[in-house]
Image (cartoon, helix red, strand yellow):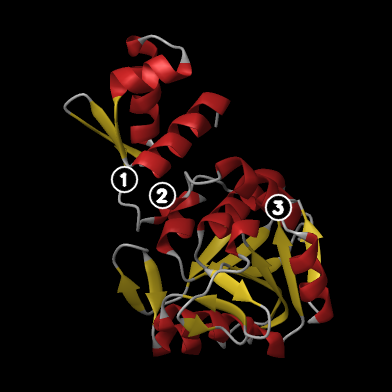
Amino acid sequence: MSKRDSQILEILTSEKKVEVASLAERLGVSNVTMRKDLDALQSRGLVQREHGYALLSNPNDLSGRLAFHYEEKKRIARKAAELVPDGSTVMIENGSCCALLARELADTKTSVHIITNSAFIAAYVRDKASVQTTLLGGMMQRDSQVTVGPLVRLCAQEFLVEYAFVGVDGWVDGIGFMNNDQMRAEAIRAMAGQANQVVVVTESNKFGQHGTSHLRLEQWQLGVVTDSGLSDDYLQKLRKANVKVTLA
């Protein structure tokens, strides 16, 4: 993704809906060039066009959330991918950093098997013969394109992996990692229970934010890969909580 594409997505994430002419002026390009950029982003499911305006696709859809802090998420994905040798089998839960991690593995590794409950992730890497994907069964959440419920747990129990990579919505000292969906929280725990190590992949701005569901990840060997914007205070608190922190 080009720098200008990232700038477009950041603006749309912040302002929700922007005139195409205004975007072109702010980024110093012609209206024709801006329309071409937006057409390309629309073809990837990231942007919608309507009557001279541009807006993100459904912000609850993972393709829309990929837009926010894209470059930071990409660096996180690259650093997390360094943990995974060729020929590995890993579990990857839903989330924008997780999706970019799956793509990074597909682009840079060979013979990797990705087990996921995310239909979005399965589709995101479907064009790469270097990865095999197993989609865990369950009830599909329409916007997030993720499977949840008892079938996820039953399917996950068929596998044993070295790493489970998961996304989160927040972390607070003394509480731990959280998200905002109880059914997804249950799916995360089901996948984490089949891994030797659980690795949270998330942006640094999630630290200090509250979620509504406690993930209880501390019961497993736990690491986190995040961007260099993480404060020293949170870094020390995470290490005190026996969380291995890797900065991208």
Q: Which mark is residue 227?
A: 3
- Disc 2, disc 3: CB below 8 Å? no
Q: CA distance from mark 2 to mark 3?
A: 21 Å
**Image coordinates for residue 179, horizontal then vertical, percent:** 49, 75
**Image coordinates for residue 183, horizontal then vertical, percent:** 41, 83
What's the residue type where badge 3 is placed?
Asp
- Disc 2, disc 1: CB below 8 Å? yes
Residue 182, quarter of picture: bottom left
Q: Which mark is residue 57?
A: 1
Q: Which residue is mark 2?
A: 63
Say above or below: 75 vs 120. above
Q: Earlier in the sequence, mark 3 or mark 1?
A: 1
Q: Residue furthest front?
A: 233
Say above or below: 151 vs 223. below
Observer able to see residue 155: no
Q: Is residue 186 left or right of residue 85?
A: left
Instruction: Judge by depth and name the residue closer to the eye, 127 or 234.
Output: 234
Residue at horizontal 62 percent and vertical 61 percent from the top: 202
Residue 16, quarter of picture: top left
Instruction: Judge by depth and name the residue closer to the eye, 207 or 95.
Output: 207
Residue at horizontal 62 percent and vertical 76 percent from the top: 172
Q: Earlier in the sequence, mark 2 or mark 3?
A: 2
* Secondary structure at numbered mark 1: loop
Q: Earlier in the sequence, mark 2 or mark 1?
A: 1
